[in-house]
Image (cartoon, grey):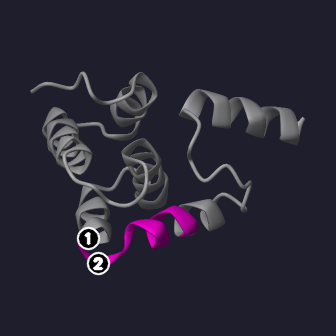
Amino acid sequence: METNSIPEDILRKIERMFTSDADKKAVLTIVLELFDENWGVGCDQLTRSLLILTDGNLVDLRKTISTMEPRDIIMSAEAKCGNPRHYFIPPFDLIELANNERNG
């Protein structure tokens, strides 16, 4: 499975969020498919939002992709995090750093 197109922060997040190798492989397959489509939003942004919104649940991830529009996924993930207004554009590392600085 070729994962070169997936940013490192997303790969690390998948590694931490999903426990079984089968789930990790399934998520990587889904993410690679996301990166092959034109969603009208950034694929990195959409993927980060999906991971946050579905909280490491593969069933929810599949359902969310099939039932929600990309912008709704991003806005729902943004709302889940308290509307920090980064819209999952920066890598997870920078988002977590900003959250830590904001929360003291």
Residue at the image position 75 percent from the left and 39 percent from the top? 99
At mark 2, the secondary structure is helix
Q: Position of residue 66 (x, y in %)?
A: 23, 72
- Residue 67: image tag: 2
Q: Residue at x 17, y 48 (%)?
A: 33
| Left/right of residue 92 with respect to residue 58 in the rendered view | right
Q: Tell me if mark 2 has few (under 14), some (14-19) or many (20+) residues whose alpha carbon lies within 10 angstroms of its own.
A: few
Q: Is residue 27 above or below residue 3?
A: below
Q: What secondary structure is the magenta-colored segment mainly?
A: helix
Q: Is residue 103 above or below residue 78?
A: above
Q: Label 2 is placed on what type of residue?
A: Thr
Are dots 1 and 2 in contact, CB under 8 Å? yes
Mark 1 element type: helix
Outermost left residue: 1
Q: Quadrant of the C terminus?
A: top right
Q: Residue at x 84, y 32 (%)?
A: 101
User: Is residue 10 located in the magenta-colored stretch of the structure?
Assistant: no
Q: Tell me where the magenta segment starts and ends, as one range.
A: 66-75
Which residue position holds label 1?
A: 63
Q: Please state which of residues 86 and 63 is positioned toward the viewer in this rendering.
A: 86
Q: Position of residue 4 (x, y in %)?
A: 24, 21
* Quarter occupied by residue 81: bottom right
Is 35 in front, or is 9?
Answer: 35
- Give, as a three-letter code, the residue at label 1: Lys
* Left or right, residue 76 beside residue 6: right
**Residue 2: image x %, image y %?**
13, 24
Residue placed farthest to the bottom in the image? 67
What crowding class fits label 1: few (fewer than 14 Cα within 10 Å), some (14-19), or many (20 or more)?
A: few
